[in-house]
Image (cartoon, rainbow, N blue to C red):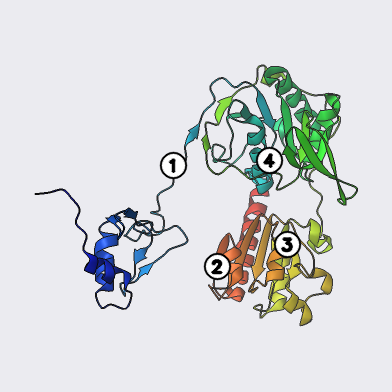
């Protein structure tokens, strides 16, 4: 019996002819069962779609672009296998790149991940990225964000607004690890002020509003954003959002390190944190709002919408259709034709998602959509989607918030 592969020209012709009655059968035998076969020129062909998608009830092959299905079978929700990224480990780093993320809410924001991506570029293959975290956190993905070393400084002295205590801790990190560069987010949530205070103690002139570092030069926005300023990369860099691509192709060790004599760091407190000042969400400008409840054409009860915004403590926004219909004032319009927003949470109620609206919320961290149409563009953009009647969802949210606050009042009493 010879091992020479024999060609069947007639079968190959059927496989190429989509109108032949046996075309589907030949495709199944040559591509599904045999991911490799010999082509008409004697070249071994490889089927790139052999393990892609799944067969539907009608027998047609479907492609699941959500990633929930793999191979020929259908994976149920929650059964999708996580891709194990290659581990990048630096046992003896040549130098350290220190990063101080904001960690708003105890988790890495998109700005923090961009900052860690920039740190990875500076660290290369021989350096290590050290992340300094103040207080408790809820983040479990430091390894996938590009962190090689993790330093957590816990204690009540780091809670709230404590810039002096944090600067003292960063000075201790400077003495112990001698980082080549310090990276902090140039943000309103603490990183911008902390970076400038720390740079002053090091007698360094920081590079602010940096959006690119390349070939030993950093470029930052200047002149109210109308021009760029380029200079050699200093030791302290305050970077903007989207300064680099976040880490996505490697997994890192995120090894825990400690600070020598960290328990003895006590600063002379000259600033007392009196807590957050209550601000009426309706008075917060749209461009500065952290939590926005936005309504569109799908909102049927606007009184309920306003009551939900007050209960949630959210700033109100609206789509262009809702503004044109007179339900909301013009200064509350969100989108490219209205106000570009950068909220941490954007809750869209009854908004289908026009192109201009999606452009205006492009910088929002988390987008939640409530809509009856599962195929609208806002549902595709959202991080969390609720396919339900907006009135029922808003009423349920109000009840939950009021019950939660009643529970807090009982505990305080």
- Give residue 320's mark: none
Residue that badge 3 annotates: 314
Query: Of the residues tagged 4 and 3, which is closer to the observer?
Result: 4
Query: Which of the pair 8/351 is nearer the observer?
Result: 8
Residue 394 seen anywhere in this rendered image of the structure: yes
Residue that badge 4 annotates: 115
Mark 3 lies on a secondary structure that is loop
Distance, label 4 to label 1, CA atoms, is 23 Å
Residue located at (34% from left, 71% from top): 60
Query: Of the residues tagged 3 and 2, which is closer to the observer?
Result: 2
Image coords of residue 236 (percent x, y): 78, 31
Residue that badge 1 annotates: 84
Q: In this picture, is 133 found above or below 398?
A: above
Query: Of the residues tagged 1 and 2, which is closer to the observer?
Result: 1
Distance, label 4 to label 2, CA atoms, is 31 Å
Residue that badge 2 annotates: 386
Q: Earlier in the sequence, mark 4 or mark 2?
A: 4
Distance, label 4 to label 3, CA atoms, is 28 Å
Mark 1 lies on a secondary structure that is loop
Residue located at (79% from left, 30% from top): 234
Q: Is residue 223 left or right of residue 208?
A: right
Mark 4 lies on a secondary structure that is helix
Quadrant housing residue 265: top right
Image coords of residue 382 (percent x, y): 60, 63
Q: Earlier in the sequence, mark 1 or mark 2?
A: 1
Distance, label 3 to label 2, CA atoms, is 18 Å
Query: Which of the pair 383/204 is nearer the observer?
Result: 204
Q: Earlier in the sequence, mark 4 or mark 1?
A: 1
Query: Which of the pair 259/361 is nearer the observer?
Result: 361
Q: Residues within 10 Å of mark 3 (few under 14, many from 20)?
A: many
């Amino acid at each position: 019996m010879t091992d020479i592969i024999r060609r069947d020209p007639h079968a190959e012709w059927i496989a190429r002819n989509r109108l032949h009655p046996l075309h589907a059968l030949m495709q199944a035998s040559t591509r599904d069962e045999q991911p490799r076969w010999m082509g008409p020129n004697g070249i071994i062909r490889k089927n790139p779609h052999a393990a892609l998608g799944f067969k539907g009830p009608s027998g047609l092959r479907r492609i699941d672009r959500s990633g929930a299905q793999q191979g020929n079978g259908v994976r149920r929700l929650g059964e999708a296998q996580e891709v194990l990224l290659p581990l990048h480990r630096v046992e003896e780093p040549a130098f350290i790149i220190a990063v101080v993320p904001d960690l708003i809410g105890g988790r890495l924001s998109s700005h923090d991940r961009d900052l860690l991506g920039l740190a990875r570029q500076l660290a290369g293959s021989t350096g290590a990225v050290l992340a300094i975290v103040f207080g408790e956190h809820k983040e479990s993905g430091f390894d996938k964000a590009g962190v090689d070393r993790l330093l957590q400084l816990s204690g009540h002295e780091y809670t709230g607004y404590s810039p002096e205590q944090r600067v003292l801790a960063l000075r201790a990190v400077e003495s112990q690890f001698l980082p080549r560069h310090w990276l902090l987010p140039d943000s309103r949530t603490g990183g911008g002020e902390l970076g400038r205070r720390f740079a002053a103690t090091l007698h360094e002139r920081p590079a602010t509003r940096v959006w690119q570092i390349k070939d030993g030069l950093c470029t930052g926005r200047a002149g109210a954003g109308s021009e760029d300023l380029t200079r050699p990369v200093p030791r302290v860099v305050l970077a903007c959002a989207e300064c680099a691509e976040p880490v996505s192709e490697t997994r890192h060790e995120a090894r825990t390190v400690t600070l020598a004599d960290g328990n003895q760091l006590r600063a002379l407190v000259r600033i007392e944190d009196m807590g957050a000042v209550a601000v009426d969400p309706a008075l917060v400008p749209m461009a500065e709002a952290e939590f926005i409840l936005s309504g569109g054409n799908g909102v049927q009860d606007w009184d309920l919408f306003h009551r939900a915004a007050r209960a949630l403590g959210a700033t109100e926004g609206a789509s262009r259709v809702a503004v044109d219909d007179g339900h909301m004032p013009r200064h509350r319009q969100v989108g490219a034709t209205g106000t570009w927003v950068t909220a941490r949470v954007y809750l869209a109620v009854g908004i289908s998602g026009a192109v201009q609206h999606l452009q205006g919320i492009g910088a929002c961290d988390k987008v939640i959509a409530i809509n009856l149409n599962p195929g609208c563009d806002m549902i595709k953009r959202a991080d969390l989607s609720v396919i339900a009647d907006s009135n029922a969802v808003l009423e349920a949210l109000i009840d939950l918030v009021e019950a939660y606050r009643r529970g807090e009042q009982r505990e305080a009493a």
